[in-house]
Amino acid sequence: MFAPLPDKPDHDALELEILALWEREDTFARLRELNADGPRFSFVDGPVTANRMVLGVHTAWGRTLKDVFQRYKALRGYRQRYQNGFDCQGLWIEVGVERALGLNSKREIEEFGLAEFARRCREVVVQSSGALTKGSIRLGQWMDWGSDYFTFSDTNIEYIWRFLHVVHDRGWLYLGHRSTEWCPRCGTSLSQHELTQAGVYQERSDPSLFVRFPLLDEEGESVVIWTTTPWTLPANVAAAVKPDAEYGLRENGEWVAVARYPDDRFVRRVPGEELVGLRYRGPFDELGPGAEVEHRVIPWGEVSLEEGTGIVHIATGAGQEDFELGRVHSLPVLSPVDEAGRFYDSYGWLHGLSTTEAADQIVGRLAEQGYLVEAGLHLHRYPHCWRCDTPLIWRVTDDWLIAVEELRQPLLDANATVEWTPAYMGKRMDDWLRNMGDWNISRRRYYGLPLPFYPCACGHLNVIGSRAELAERAVSGLEQLEELRRPWIDDVPIRCEACGEPVERVVEVGDVWLDAGIVPFSTLGWKSPEYVEEGYATGAARGLTDADLPDHTYWEEWFPADWVSEMREQIRLWFYSQLFMSVALTGRAPFRKVLGYEKMLDEAGREMHSSWGNTIDAPDAFARMGADVMRWQYCAQPPDRNLLFGFGPAHAIQRKLLTLWNSARFLVDYGTIEQFTPRLADLEGLEDVEDPLDRWLVERTRALVAEATSAYERWLTVDVVRAFEGFVDDLSNWYIRLSRRRFWQGRDEEALRTLWHALVQGLRVIAPVMPFLAEHLWRALVRVERAPSSIFHAGWPALPEADARVLEEMADVRRVVELGRRARSASGIKLRQPLPRLVVEGAAGIEPLLALVRDELRVKDVELGPVASEVVVKPNLPLLGPRLGPALGAVRTALQAGDYEELGDGRIRVVGHELGPEEVLVERLGLAGWSVASADGVTVALETDLDDELLREGRVFELVHRVNAMRKEAGLALGDRIALTLPAADRDLLEHAEWIKAETLAVELAAGSDGEVAIARR
Ligand SMILES: [Zn+2]
Ligand SMILES: [Zn+2]
């Protein structure tokens, strides 16, 4: 017996019930027991940043894909790891805490106290990881919750130390002195890959200044430069010209590039190289630092003649290209602003001002001194801090870098071993690897990996590789070391291994991508001598997880990952940092296969922003659409296109799922009436069916399993969903519709068995995508002794290959029926009116299935044979008009008269012109009393002449339809019997009394005396 199903599913309620059931029955743990001896499938989770207090629908997308493939592999018997990860350090966490505490600068953080600040950051991770876990469980993600890895654990930190130690041994670690993008609010430099994140480059309007620099050697002459960053002018040291470009002197003494002002009058013209070496007065020499510089005109081949004046202001301390140019020409470096982007005291009246505050005063002073030629505004794309949205500046700083040159080729080679889906993402990785610069790993922040670098005054750089080494070499401070973290670690000086003097750690922390990149080593126990239970729960992670630190044998078993999946942005972030660290440590890629996917936008195609009110939190989506519908939306998405997520698409999905639901309900309703009991053997295969429709559905089901399996193996959930949707449509709108009568007219065991088999196999293949509804319907339908109680314990369906001939024959039947409907519609005769005959030409394979066509099209007889019709050939005007010109008229007339010759292959000769098949439109018209339709080589003709008997039958069909609608309106159950009274005018229909009774479940039938149909329950 089946459990009854309501009219439609309440997704939210149903899902909560299933979650409770899974917990009660320990379904996930039992699944892992079932697979304990299975083959290995190694998945490594990319950590989610634990800074939000609710799961976002973006994060839920990735989590769904991970869960879908882990569930699929589990159904196929694979033994897997299910460790979830949280990213716990870095600016995301810090900036959130700063905002919550109302802190606005690094100075304020230090005044607040680093120990307390660290504790607050940890608290954010504790709260957020709890909320994200809760949301993920609600989403249906099966993970080892409670055994998560947290990147701020001391163990993870130690593993990064070990990596940095190796990097140092290889000679790749160095302290770079460079100009770099800098966030003045966060007080740190950013690395190249951080600048590639979404939202970094934004349109922005900045001052546009044309400024005159007076030449010292040529009285009354000056060079004119253009800048959009006024704050860099006090740091000016040179002006660059393009040596081979032509420069002109205006009457007022200003030098500019001629190409920029082609219509100006010039009193002198010289090549740029003649200006090189001229000295000029700096714009802010009175402030001190500038006065010590000899400002000169220098040559630079890269000077643009596309914008500005063709003369470029060079501030070596405030621009990357400027800095590099300064190296070439041995220019001095003026660094005007401090870490917070404020002018140093040496800059006189500018001191303490931020770069934006200084702009107005700088413009004012330039105007006063007569240096300002023109001031306006300039709209351009400008980089912003990815975390706090502050416009970036450039500063010359000392950063710790890892040189990539020696690793570049090994990285490219390793990437060549990885199978990327979609393939273009692998090419993106290649491009990045070919073009990336050295990895800037240092950040001047607080809550992050402490870089274990101890540069000694003697010139030796000490790099600590483990906590044990730190303990061994510490001079003092070990007793207060709560975690391997600032501020505690800063109070542990060590002894220099070269000179024996005490030496302090640098203050910098590490790039967060080191934290996530080390995961394939730190969580799998690389080089760990023993397996330590709960050994990963160290430092800040203590008390948050019971994750183990496995041993090296374990690492060898699970490394590299068979599969990882994240969004495209991670190519330059997590995929890259993992690849980099893995190639540095082992020479190998850390993953074999990658599934990437594009961005999520709202359903109108806009970015989601909380300030625009179009973001969606997962709990809201769970309540309003359900996790299954969310998951379906994610899975239906081709990974190479942006996902437009929202409640609108969710409604469309709910409607599709209702078709599946109604099919299951149909089986439950009729199966219950017939007291049908499914057989365990039918779960796997169904061989012994006779009816052609049943035979077809069995083959159709086999085809679905094959299509879905292939799609999962190609990591394309979109193809799984497409295959399933096609199957449900065939099941509902073809099989059930055509078989309705068999279910209705009494016990047809074979039809019930076939439908049950097909539905259950369908549920099994869609279960990874839609685990709740699949589990719910499984439990409603599969109440069979010895059958697994959970669909996830049933394994993967193993069906034989589908018989292609059976599928093709049915496809032909559907084509013929479609044409038959078209012919009927053209004739204007109602659907319920039986017709005498259909003739089919060009689909001989349907012969065994003619009865289906007959019933479906409501015709008395179906014949195979040539269709007598009139062929009408017309010119295809858009093609023939231009080709034939005035000759078209004669061609048209001749075609109309049938005055042409067929040449084969659809070619035609007419009044001396030869026409190709695409140049004419051939229509087949029915002879009198026939309606004809044709397409793709199949033609059907429907006879439309009606006699009295056919008309009477048509009225019976109308009556039956009417009565069944009345039964429904009256709320009768499917099996209820009725007494039926016909209108007096329909007395002649009593000739078909038995037919009418059977179709309406009437036990009494009579003609009344008035004009109404009446029913009464019996
Ligand atoms: Zn910032
Ligand atoms: Zn030393």
Image (spheres, rainbow, N blue to C red):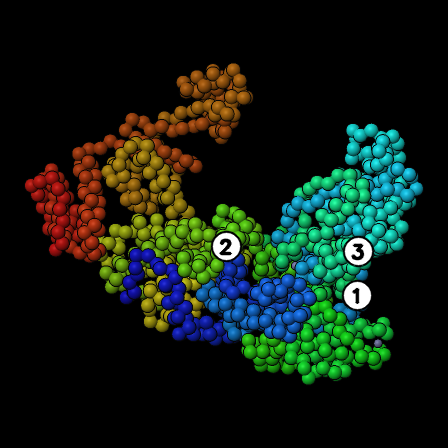
Q: Which image quadrant for residue 14?
A: bottom left
Q: Earlier in the sequence, mark 3 or mark 1?
A: 1
Say what secondary structure mark 1 lies in: strand
Label 2: state its secondary structure: loop
Tag in front: 3 or 1: 3
Taking the image in four quarters, ligand 1 sits in the one at bottom right
Mark toward the start of the polypeptide (1 vs 2): 1
At label 3, which amino acid type do we have? Gly
Relative depth, front residue between 579 and 314? 314
Q: Residue at x 37, y 67 (%)?
A: 17
The residue at which mark 1 appears reads as: 174
Instruction: Locate residue 994, reporting x and y percent.
Output: 14, 48
The amino acid type of the residue labelled 1 equals: Tyr
Instruction: Identify which residue, 80 or 476, lies in the foreground.
Output: 476
- Residue under label 2, please give it: 615
Query: Which disc is residue 525 wearing?
Result: none
At horizontal 66% and vertical 63% (from top left) the residue drawn is 105
Name the residue located 73 percent from the left edge and 70 percent from the top edge.
507
Question: Where residue 888 appears, x then y in whole percent?
Answer: 49, 18
Distance from label 3 to label 1 (Cα)? 35 Å
Q: Residue beneath label 3, please?
A: 348
Specify the quadrant of the image occupied by residue 772: bottom left
Q: Position of residue 60 (x, y in %)?
A: 50, 60
Query: Outermost residue, left direction?
Result: 1009
